[in-house]
Amino acid sequence: MRNRMVTGALCATVLIGVAPVAAASAASGPMGFDPIAGSAYDEASTTWSEPYVAPEGFTQALVADETVLDIYAGEDDLTDMNVTNETGPEAGRYLYRTHEVGANGSVSVVDLQTGEAKVLEQQEYYNRLDGLTWTPWGTLLFAEETAGGHVYEAFLDPKDPTVVTHVEERTQLGILRHEGIGADADGSVYVIDELNGGSIYRFVPTVRGELGAGQLYALKLTELTDAEQLWNQATFSQKVGAFEWVALDQAQVAIDADVASNAVVATEFGRPEDVQLIGQKLYVANTSEDRVIEIDLAKQTVSGFVEKGVNVPAEDQGAEVTGFNNPDNLAKGPDGRLWIVEDNDFSDVWVTDLDKDSDGRADTVELFASLKDQTAETSGVYFGKDPNTVYLNIQHPGKELADGTWAISKD
């Protein structure tokens, strides 16, 4: 997520394609749509009734904002990531959200049937809560996006998933600037370090579902020299190819996992911010690279799945060009496509096609929606049980009391 001033004048909307971006998408199937013409430059507003420019045939509905639940009165709630209870009783009914405030952080929950919202968990020492995921063993993992950030595991009442019974700190997953978290069915947990020079990590527990003990590994490309592993804005696109998972010093991991990864010269990327598992592929949004990489866990290879100027346009507001800028959060769509939201003015929502020609890149990248509020960003994207609805969080908008969650559904 960001902390920066908004600059740049508004401009007209023009979408310039970079092959192989398709001009249109089949509008059939779950969330099938015809791409919108461009970013919301000429629809800028802080008084919107619907936050997004969205395709025809879709409806926008408020799930919960600060008019429903105002956790930090007089301050932005900074609604961040979102996920539902994906397993167990009444699976999919409850939407959990982290709040990225600097102190007294919280996790909230919204009942998607009744609309009731409340604070699920809050502590004075929670700092910039961000990453959030539901685990296959029925707990919530949430984490802090800050230097010295921790991962926490919340255990819920089996009879009432809106009640936390206890929380465990999971230092073995690394003390890092955490954002995205992904939990695999085999028990592995994937985390990242959100900085220029951050690495990508895999935690393998000794016992599946028990995160108190195990081994943290860092990704290291095998065809690069040690110098080439380091973060370099000029050469990031060369960071592709075969990789290995390198075991880290677990004692150091629990103090500073970045130091542990530096000791083995793990590969560094430009602000890895979110992860998304789709089958045997792990996708990572590298924000300052304007690139989403695909990590094939079976073949152990890395490729540039989406990259500005390659298979998606580069944004240039001054030249009136809509394009890809600061990819931030990721989601798996109901048909297996990857959804990407930007940390950017007029935050755009992009959808990729699958890599049908097996070249490691998305065959198409299409624009689904664009946020009208220039001061805001879309900070969470998620699909629950309804394949025709995507949930989007909005953070720090210009509109009053509008930090919260919206649903965009296919009619």
Image (cartoon, rainbow, N blue to C red):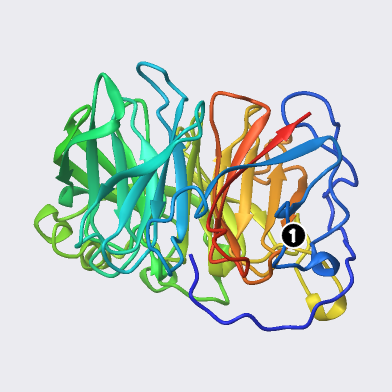
> Against 10, is 297 above or below?
above
Q: Horizontally, is 226 left or right of 250 in the view?
A: right
> Against 3, is 379 above or below?
above
> Against 288, is 155 above or below?
above
Considering every residue shown, the one lying at the far left of the view is 251
| SS for callout 1 | loop
| Screen quadrant of the C terminus | top right
Q: Horizontally, is 118 left or right of 368 in the view?
A: left
Q: Is residue 394 visible?
A: yes
User: 200 or 323, which lies in front?
Assistant: 323
Q: Is residue 221 visible?
A: no
Residue 39, image x and y in percent? 79, 62
Would you identify the image quadrant in which residue 235 lies?
bottom right
Considering every residue shown, the one lying at the far top of the view is 89
Residue 110, image x and y in percent? 44, 37
Q: Residue placed at 40% from the left, 28% from the top?
A: 85
> Against 292, is 47 above or below?
below
Would you identify the image quadrant in which residue 320 lies?
bottom right
User: 277 or 261, which lies in front?
Assistant: 277
Amino acid type, residue under disc 1 in the picture? Val
The residue identified by callout 1 is 310
Q: Residue placed at 63% from the left, 72% from the top?
A: 375
User: 235 or 207, which lies in front?
Assistant: 207
Would you identify the image quadrant in which residue 212 lies?
top left
